[in-house]
Image (cartoon, grey):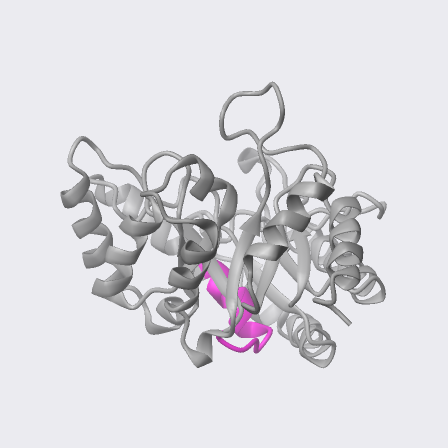
Amino acid sequence: MKIGYPCINESLPCTSSSTFRLASFSEERLLETTARNFACLENILEYNVAHNLLFFRMSSDLVPFASHKICTVDWQMHFKSTLEKIGRYIQNHGLRISMHPDQFVVLNSPKPEIVENSVRELVYQCEVMDLMQLESSAKLQIHGGGVYGDKPAAMQRFIETYALLPENVKNRLVIENDDRLYSLQDCLFIHEQTGIPILFDNFHHECLNNGEPMHEALALAAQTWQENDGILMMDYSSQALGERKGKHTDQIVEALFREFLLELRGLDLDIMLEIKNKEVSALKAVSIAREMGLLV
């Protein structure tokens, strides 16, 4: 088991997601900003290795506007050696890596321009991991998308778009159950048609499900991962007290996390904590999992 957190380390004085306004775009601005982002990413990964936080979701904004048509900069060649160096560090230290495109990435939109832009974003993020020479166990996670008044038709559009994706993108893509529209069962249907693995979200499953107990839901999601995909990835959080349904808690609730780990019943997986205080909760989660004999 590996435990981690997404994108931002609040203990470090840098960010790997610096960007700028589109109106300010220039090749020089892009290269300077990207260089800072990659330097910070290296710092974050070093911190994570030192603290046994071996699962990390990289920012989508490592290369600002990389998927935008305005970007004709050959950032891939410019940062080739940097990305190879980061990739070697990741592999030498046994880190698991993911990326999660923003909500505007929707493969089943009825608007062709949205689908086109979504594919461009997936290609860019896949390029980052390919240039790092990461194995196919490093994943890109997306949601099912919208339903647009006709869920079966929307699911079919996802399936048809998925079939047209470049092979390197398909090798990294995983679909996540969400809290309002696409349940685990919906994702399983899409998996049956495409082979796409399901990244399981426990909190989303609590919000939207078809009655599956947590341990059963975990097992169903795990069965969608093949050997070359690595073990099941999942997102973990819990409900913020007194807030709207679906709002993530600001810090880990230790009793709930212990209860969740008991539901694993021997299942091996990697856990991404989607909790506001990032590495602070991840460090507590590592401590709890070690205490329970799930980590060495």
Q: Does 129 lie within the magenta span?
A: yes
Residue 238 shown left or right of residue 278 in the figure: left
Residue 45 point in image, percent of width and height? 75, 63
Looking at the image, can residue 58 be seen? no
Residue depicted at 22% across the width and 39% down the height: 111
Along the horizontal axis of the image, is 122 left or right of 11? left
* Quadrant assignment for the C terminus: bottom right
Left or right: 258 in relation to 182: right
Whole-percent x, y for residue 16 in the image: 70, 51
Horizontal relation, residue 232 to residue 9: left or right? left
Eyeballing the image, is 59 above or below 77?
above
Quarter of the image for the N terminus: give it. bottom right
Please name the residue shown 74% across and 51% down the image: 282
Q: Residue 53, how many percent across, how many down?
A: 74, 61
Instruction: Give the extent of the magenta segment.
Output: 124-136
Relative to 26, does residue 97 appear above or below in the rendering?
Answer: below
Residue 281 image-quadrant placement: top right
Is the residue 271 above or below the residue 148 in the image? below
Using the image as rendered, state which of residue 204 and residue 40 is in the foreground: 204
- Which of the two residues, 50 or 23, is positioned nearer the viewer here? 50
Residue 291 on the magenta span: no
Question: Is the magenta region chiefly helix, strand or loop?
Answer: helix
Residue 275 showing in the rendered view? yes
Q: Which residue is rendered at x = 68% and y = 56% of the image? A: 4
Q: How many marks?
A: 0
